[in-house]
Image (tube, grey):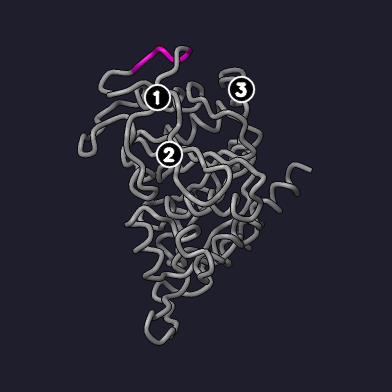
Amino acid sequence: MARGLPKQKPIAGVKQVVVVASGKGGVGKSTTAVNLALGLMANDPSKSVGLLDADVYGPSIPKLMNLKGNPELKEKNLSTLPGLTSDCCEPLTFSSSLPPPPLSMSMGFLVEDVAPIVWRGLMVMSAIEKMLRQVDWGSLDYLVVDMPPGTGDVQLSITQNVPIAGAVIVSTPQDIALLDARRGAEMFKKVHVPVLGLVQNMSVFRCPNCDHQTHIFGSEGARQLADTLGVGLLGDVPLHLNIRETSDRGQPVVVSSPHSPEAEAYRKVASAVVQRLQEVHP
């Protein structure tokens, strides 16, 4: 079986690839991926970070980071895919106070805003390969990859073709979300990708008026799953209006409200991810 697997090739200039995944949609995975990438930079401005939106059918990064436009074509990237409005090449830069600004690439930059992506598996795999290999990422300490929900072709293609430093699993504390989160974690273990830990998203609702806390989706479910899997809980992120509003504006909370408890929660997750990477890859 091992002889039939593709050989992993590092991405030129990228030191470590961290994938952010969830077993199902609707648990705040993409928001977590964006704020994780920005948190890595906020915690250590000397680090360069890229963000790849691998959710081909439902790209969210352009909206979450308020990025529009076609990536600039470079001479070395001349191949294209049917239906794309541009070649994969120069990543777009998110405007923020963080030096250097994070680089981003998404299928959402390459198709019209409302255009459905109706592709079979082979075309999706080809698109992922181009965004990984034919983007001028430059020199990156971390490439954060926002994976699509589930455990399908994209997940297998990325993990089998690129050395992954670790996976971050995002889930709410709700039982139905935890079932799929466990499937995602078990998939990464099967393909020998270290699971860095779980992020318990929407862990508690904080009323913006009185700050009363309510556990809408249950309490400590992701922490219990992390214990079952033998991995750590990377952090708790609350269900808060500020996160939703800043995400909808394309100004993620880590940079638009850096002193808020919500931003601090994401920075703690980023710190925990770095610590786990150092433990796994000493």
Q: Amino acid at mark 3?
A: Lys
**Image quadrant assignment for residue 105:** top left
Residue 124 location in percent, x, y?
36, 27
What residue is shown with label 2? 53
- Provide residue 53's location: percent of width, then percent of height: 43, 39
Q: Is residue 192 visible?
A: no
As helix, strand or loop, the secondary structure at mark 3 comes to: loop
Q: Is residue 197 magenta?
A: no
Look at the picture and state if 215 lies above or below 194: below
Say which amino acid is labelled 2: Asp
Q: Amino acid at mark 1?
A: Glu
Q: Pointer 1: residues within 10 angstroms few (<14), some, or many (20+)?
A: few
Position of the N terminus, as image quadrant, is top right
Using the image, tell me which numbered label, if any, was put on residue 9.
3
In the image, the segment drawn in magenta is: 76-80
Magenta span dominant secondary structure: loop
Could you tell me which secondary element the residue under label 2 belongs to?
Answer: strand
Q: Residue at x 56, y 62 (%)?
A: 225
